[in-house]
Amino acid sequence: MSNDTQNEISEPTLAKNFDAKSVEPRIAKLWDDLDAFAAGAGAKPDADPYCIVIPPPNVTGSLHMGHALNNTLQDILIRFERMRGKNVLWQPGMDHAGIATQMVVERQLAEKQIHRRDIGREEFVKKIWEWKEESGGTIFNQMKRLGASCDWSRERFTMDEGLSKAVLEVFVSLYKEDLIYKDKRLVNWDPKLLTAISDLEVEQIETKGHLWYFRYPLEDGVTYEHPYNLDEEGEKTPWKPSDGDPAGYETRDYLVVATTRPETMLGDTGVAVSPDDPRYKSLVGKHVTLPLVGRKIPIVADEYPDPEEGTGAVKMTPAHDFNDFEVGKRQNLPAINILHDDASIFLAGNKKFLEGLESTTQVETLIAELDGKDRFKVRALIVEMFEQADLLDKIEDHKHQVPHGDRGGVPIEPYLTDQWYVDAATLAKPAIASVREERTNFVPKNWENTYFSWMENIQPWCISRQLWWGHQIPAWYGPNKDDLLNDAAEHRIEIFVAKSEAEAIEQAQEYYGKSAAISITTNPNFKLWGVESENITKIELRRDEDVLDTWFSSALWPFSTLGWPDQTAELKKYYQTDVLVTGFDIIPFWVARMMMMGLHFMKDEDGKPVEPFHTVYVHALVLDKHGAKMSKSKGNVIDPLNLIDEYGADALRFTMAIMGGQGRDIRLDTTRIAGYRNFGTKLWNATRFAQMNGVKHGIAIDRAEVKLTVNRWILTELDKAVADITANIEKYRFNDAAGAAYKFVWNLYCDWYLELLKPVFAGDDEDAKAEAQICCGYVLDAIYTFLHPFMPFMTEELWAETAERDVILCHAPWPKPETHDDGAADEINWLVGLITELRSVRAEMNIKPGAFIPLIMAGANDVTKARLKTHAAALRQLGRVENIELAEDAPKGSAQIVIGEATACLPLAGLIDLGEEKSRLEKELKKLDGEIKRLEGKLGNQRFVANAPAEIVAEEKGKLEEYKAQRVRVATAFERVAEAV
RNA sequence: GGGCGAUUAGCUCAGUGGGAGAGCACUACAUUGACAUUGUAGGGGUCACUGGUUCAAUCCCAGUAUCGCCCACCA
């Protein structure tokens, strides 16, 4: 022992403040150089695995606050488990994000006046790959700045070779099981992006519109009696069946139907009424003439119309409305498509539309006026035409939900096309059971409602997209053999689903026979038929042009990234993964589908399905500080990178953790980030203080040997804190874990422990000093460790700065709490209480903060006497009292603090205003009286004493006694002061 | 229309069936030996409202109000 046992302040090596800007990149590089995050890094060979797969960000994405939260929480779990000794893999990767990515590159081309069709599919896809190599994945560098400890060497991409192989495998095998099929039905069609989209990609947006009431004339000679009501002014008002007897009837030769989309009337093929509707009973089976078009369409009875709504008669457009499509199927109404794929009106050359129409001038005019025009323009024109024809009954303002494509942003059209579907209902069943039977658990649990409500009403999942960027559907089309040979009028298509072109040809060969020469064409004008002879000699196959929904490949993420369909070592080790951390918005998009696919394809040794993860942690949304969603258009977007620049990654992470409480959205207020940046500075300076006092790091402590009460106390508190933090991370209570860490570091370690050590370091008890130096460093080391998951950069830096270490901090073992309560807490709590009271009285009495004043302890017992002696230095430094003396009674004219059995007196006659001291004590008495009265009332209540648990009653009794004793002492003090005044 | 959540200090939020908490903001004082990105002390809340259960409700239950989100095919 040399210099550091003397009362010298050493020069700290740490700068005064933590410089995040220079330290963070350096630490990041350190981790990188050491491959610190590689799968299993730092773990023993037989360690338990722990795996999280990242929710793959879009390749076009950049880090937003949602990612910052999501990745912070994952990284906390990952670092925590890594330090606990598990074999950890955090699997990173990206999503190819079909539409989003294609749009980005299309926009770039548009700047050069190029359309993707100009350069062709192959060239266009090449351009997207080029773009991806150049600009894609910037988000990963941003995530590294956040400190995300993914195994970056294992980065995957949903379009890369391995994952594409998984997609093929899944598609082909689901097809073979009839869980994937092709079907012609109405889909949600995005007329801007010219592709089908799934139900989930449709957003309902409330829109102000109108409800137009049109008159459809009944066929010649048909009339009916239409009931009406009368209002107070004698005007006719609509009648509904529930109104009872109508006021009267009028004879009508037309039906009134209402619509929000007048343009669809061009495709009307019927009018439906309820079979129970008394108004229209006589009309069922009759016809109306479709205005403007002149088509005769039937009036049908169907359970779909609600007699209480609208007019009770509903126009049917099976090709452009999901309900009408169903009614059409039931009632045998044809579906007439009247839209091009871009939602312009399709009349000229529209075979189905023209069928059965006489080529009258009326129709010719209609075609001339409307064909090729945009749907909304046509809407206005149609209304105008109805008005001119005197068939517009009335117009009402109408608010309704209009479906919009979430990417293209324009209203979608229900559109009749061939698409591929996944039989989601079948796959959903085991996925529902897994959650019901708690093999997979949502945290917080209430998100299971979202999951169930989605899964239990699940519709066939439309997985084909008319895009170029994505996994091309592995289906090849050829002509139906029999149709070919029989020269049938209707040509059916034969589908060959295969993992490769060669396999498809093989299948085709088998189907068409050995004599057929089979080739693949990409010719868009290719025809499926047209052979020359009755022997099939030449067949061209053409691959389906469509690609798969992006979420199809994402659904395979937990096993495809681990190497599936190959049975890799990683797959074996890390599947089932542990927890999925995600926002609630993609529970149906992603979580539900991963459950379906995982359970279908992954089996354990006994062939039992294995869920992709045992826990789904659902976190909140990050909103601005007023609770609004962040969006570019609102201009309230906070860029996490700016926050990292300003406050450091650790501060941002800590904020995310402490605000990421379960089941609640986060309103981000940047002042809080500043607060947690300050927290880092506090810890930094605590270390600096330690350095100045020769504190030693990395030395093990035998707790039984620790002598100083403060040291024993802080070690006990440390144990409590570590246990608390550990338990809370295990329970995904990130806010509680961060809160416990914060309180321990600032409110216990810095505010009291270091303050209480100051007199020790300044004193001349060398043994005490040596012990304090070791203990102080030991606790600091523990702090670095338990804070590391939250603030990895600073703690890693401090870890390195304070001692030569065997391991870097992110591989250091998580502290283990030892329970060891020896009563030190009582003593320190007494001391802390006394000092706090001293400070409070001094402040109230306006005594100069720096001034030392004498203390006389009246009525102290032996324990108190001993404590006064032990902590004299601390009381001097922190309470600014000196010359501590003992007395039987409090001297006159002093301020008095009742603490335990004793009274601490500050003899300040002349220095303080005794009147003020008197009123201070009076206030205290009043407060005690209030408490005593409350407790006496409670304990006097027979029902309380009889019904409350015994320990509660005893507790309250104890409190009452305590208050009463306290009151006696305070009253004595008060009287003494009162006398002196 | 159905479902979920929120309502606690000026602001952002924790929290518990048994004496209301944090951060920021505010007030006063302090400061060249860890830290002004600080310290000490202090002010500030009928825990949205109304009922109910209970010995006891901010907490549990029901209803009301306000706000937010999700789902849904109303012509």
Image (cartoon, rainbow, N blue to C red):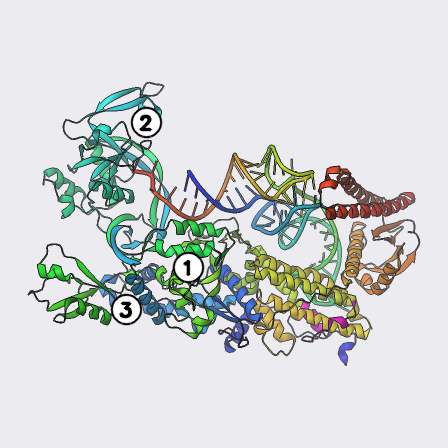
N-terminal label among 2 and 1: 2
| Circles 3 and 1 on the same chain | yes
How far from the left and from the top, in percent, is residue A784?
63, 69
The crowd level at tag 2 (other Cα within 10 Å; few <14, some 14-19, many 20+) is some
Q: Is residue A619 above or below residue A287?
A: below
* Mark 3 or 1, nearer chain start: 3
Tell me if A37 is positioned left or right of A537 in this view: right
Q: Earlier in the sequence, mark 3 or mark 2?
A: 2
- Say which amino acid is labelled 2: Pro
Q: Residue at x 48, y 49 (%)?
A: A628
Q: Look at mark 1 in the image and give the residue it sits on.
A: A595
Question: Label 2 marks which chain's residue?
Answer: A
- What span is in magenta? A686-708
Q: Chain of mark 1?
A: A
Seen as rendered, the residue at the extreme bottom is A2
- The residue at which mark 3 appears reads as A499
Going by the numbered disc 3, the residue's amino acid type is Lys
Tell whether A280 sits left or right of A204.
left
Which residue is at the front of the view, A239 or A44?
A: A44
At numbered mark 1, what does the secondary structure look like: helix, strand or loop?
helix
State the residue position of label 2: A241
Q: Amino acid at mark 1?
A: Met
Label 3 and label 1: CA atoms lie apart by 24 Å
SS for dot 3? loop
